[in-house]
Image: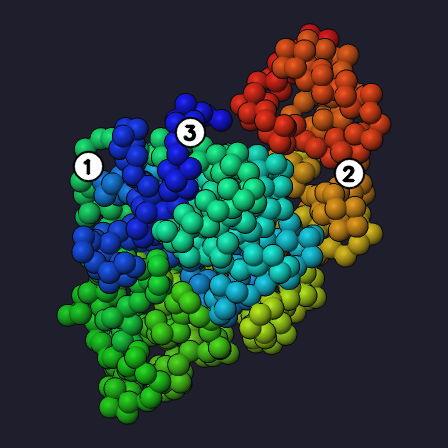
Amino acid sequence: MKNNEIIKNLSLEEKIKIVTGHAFWYTYDLEDKGLNALLLTDGPSGVRKQEEGADALGLNQSIKTISFPSLALIASSFDKNLLRQYGEYLGQIAKSEKVNVLLGPGINIKRNPLAGRNFEYMSEDPLVAGKLATAYINGLQSQGIGSSVKHFAANNRENQRFTNSSNIDERTLREIYLSAFETVVKYAQPATIMSSYNAINHVPVSENKWLLTDVLRNEWGYQGVVVSDWSAIKHRSNSLKAGLNLEMPGKGQSTLTEVTNAVKNGELDEHILDISVDRVLTLIKQHQIKDEAQSYDKASYHDFSRVLASKSIILLKNENNNLPINSSSLGLIGELAAKPRIQGGGSSKVNPYNIVTPLEAFNKHQVEYAQGYYISNHEVDQKLQQEAVKVAQQNDQVILFLGYPESYETEGFDKNALALPDNQLTLLDVVTRENQNVTVVLQNGGTVLMPWAHKVKSIVETYLSGEAVGEAIKDVLTGKQNPAGKLTETVPKRLEDVPSYLTFNQSKAEEDYREGIYVGYRYYDTKHIKTQFPFGHGLSYTTFEYSNIKIAPQENSLKINLDIKNTGKIFGEEVIQVYIGNRASDIDMPLKELRDFERIALDANESKIITFDIPYKALRWFNNNTRQWQIDDGEYVVYVGSSVEDIRLEQSITLDITNQTKSYWIHEDTYVYELVLRKNEIKQSLKQYQLDELIGKVTEDPELAPVFENLPLRSLIMLDMDIATVHDFINAANEELKHK
């Protein structure tokens, strides 16, 4: 342990306090050790820090800061560089406010569009969530601020979230619901991971040793702190044994009494408590803010929020190049133009610095405006509707602002339907009868059904765009920003088409994931079900040509080259998506799955050669029978396109992967048993790091061999080997191999 000297001088009571939250947002104060308490606070869409003297939750009395777009929108950028930059901005704000750990990002999978907290999450696809979250976390933590990735794991509904059990087979759990978390652990090492409220297969996550220790630490090599979601823990001693390190906010004397008794009665080994103490102490040391608080220029940060939103907004439909706006007279209709929704409700809600409404951005003196409806209720107001009709009649082009009220979607409950309020739908009907040149601008946290899509020329999805909502929308509508956002979730034609329709929220206690791996596009695409708008869809004001695909198998990866050209007359950005279909497997597989993506900027008539290097490991699937990952030899189909449906290039290839992936070099995922087979090649390195003794034990005892066949090197932390030492051994062994 890294903090032995401190720990051995702590009383049992002090140890328990260190792994227990103090008050609502803070860790235990260790000023006598030269360490200040850490402040953990909400941060998915900005830094929500409560003001002094505010209520415990601080929902309504938080500091004034930048309200950034929701993660549902930012993820639509598919831009890893932009997400890293966003993380850096959040880190700078947090540092200025003396916040040590930000509770975000949320990377739960959007299993069902009714889920009430989907606005906080990134995608229905784990690759998108994992890669974009990695960039976000690396940006945030580059500023010295810790991240808290949430909610681990399979927390995919809000109703009865404290008590319901997510019942999932292991293949589905690993391939879909754990995959993004595995990515961020391996490529970002977040300071903390927040355990979720729910149970998995009837074992509460906060007490799930298989998830929190066997998988998270021993398989993936996680080094940080597992923190509870607020008030998630029922039995503190059980959660400590499972591997949950920090209880928030802490139950004070109740926790102290429970854990003390458990240690004294022999129910809890004090060494297990010490491990959590060590990890929390390391967290506190690593995330002290010692510098004086530096103020940040709110105006420039507001401008960045505008960039984030404008580069992420999705153009869903644009019939006859209706946009960008080119009319001599323009009408704006809808209360959301004057009173926009900028963020979701609940713990992500921040106190915005400067909201710029769409009406303000367009300059209300240069456009004609009608309220059209009240966002607060569903009733049709005849007077407001008639005023809207006049605006529609008197202007060449109409921008109609529609969306969900905040009461529809917030933390704590799920939606019952995906339709817009009745008064908005009625307004859409009357406006489109009077004007044939209507653009709908949507403001919503999650998916909206659009049976009305054929009635309008253009549809622009803005989700919840943050405080610069008006400026960002104007940038896109006027062409100042060429839209390049893409859907990270499928928009179905009907709720009944959703793969989890029959099981979602059907029981208070049980949530059965009977659709298995067929979540989102994996289901629609494989079953050939027509969607309103497919995953990955998003239009531009220019056009792109894909050509000249070349696929070359490498030792450990598949190298894909292609040409892309901007064939239009203006600058634009395109998100190139690479999907791969497994035709080799003898079990059911999706038709194709996203395996990589890249956002590319191109000037008019500019061409680029784009290269993707996809590890064979990305093609693995989890075998429920053997409980092992598996890679198949045989035929694969590579698809490259602009969405899961808009495929521009396609090519089949036969791969002998199992032979190709037996790499000469040793790495984190090399199994310990492979060292037995190669012990003579790396004899010096094994001896230097005392692994020769382990090899000897495995060789001498045949019963140990099956255990080590499935133990990768990174899991040697189970045997008290520090992960840094594992890396040092790997480097030494490969150096030794170089000279063979």
Residue lying at 32% horizontally and 89% vertically, measured from the top left: 380
Residue 65 location (% of width, % of height): 23, 52
Q: Nearer the viewer, mark 3 or mark 2?
A: 3
Q: Circle 1 — which element?
A: loop
Query: Are the residues flagged by discs 3 and 1 in contact, CB closer than 8 Å?
Result: no
Q: Which of 539 and 599 lies nearest the eye of the viewer?
A: 599
Q: Circle 2 — which element?
A: strand
Q: Can the viewer see residue 94? A: yes
Residue lying at 49% horizontally and 57% vertically, measured from the top left: 234
Query: Are the residues flagged by discs 3 and 2 in contact, CB closer than 8 Å?
Result: no
In the displayed structure, does residue 571 sit left or right of residue 608?
left
* Disc nearer the start of the sequence (2/1): 1
Q: Which residue is mark 2?
A: 655
Q: Which of 418 and 566 lies nearest the eye of the viewer?
A: 418
- Number of residues whose C-alpha sits closer than 10 Å to that of mark 1, classed few (under 14), some (14–19) or many (20 or more): some
Q: Which of 213 and 536 lies nearest the eye of the viewer?
A: 213
Q: Can the viewer see residue 89? A: no
The structure's colour scheme is: rainbow
Type of amino acid at the residue the image marks with label 2: Leu
Looking at the image, is 713 positioned above or below residue 235?
A: above
Where residue 293 is drawn, which disc sits there?
Answer: 1
Instruction: Name the residue at the bottom extreme.
Output: 382
Q: Which residue is mark 3?
A: 7
| Distance in Å between CA atoms under marks 3 and 2 | 53 Å
Where residue 610 is drawn, which disc sits there?
Answer: none
Residue 276 location (% of width, % of height): 47, 38
In the displayed structure, does residue 229 sit left or right of residue 645?
left
Q: Nearer the viewer, mark 2 or mark 1?
A: 1
- Number of residues whose C-alpha sits closer than 10 Å to that of mark 3, classed few (under 14), some (14–19) or many (20 or more): some
Task: Indicate the quadrant where residue 344 lies.
Answer: bottom left
Type of amino acid at the residue the image marks with label 3: Ile
Q: Nearer the viewer, mark 3 or mark 1?
A: 3
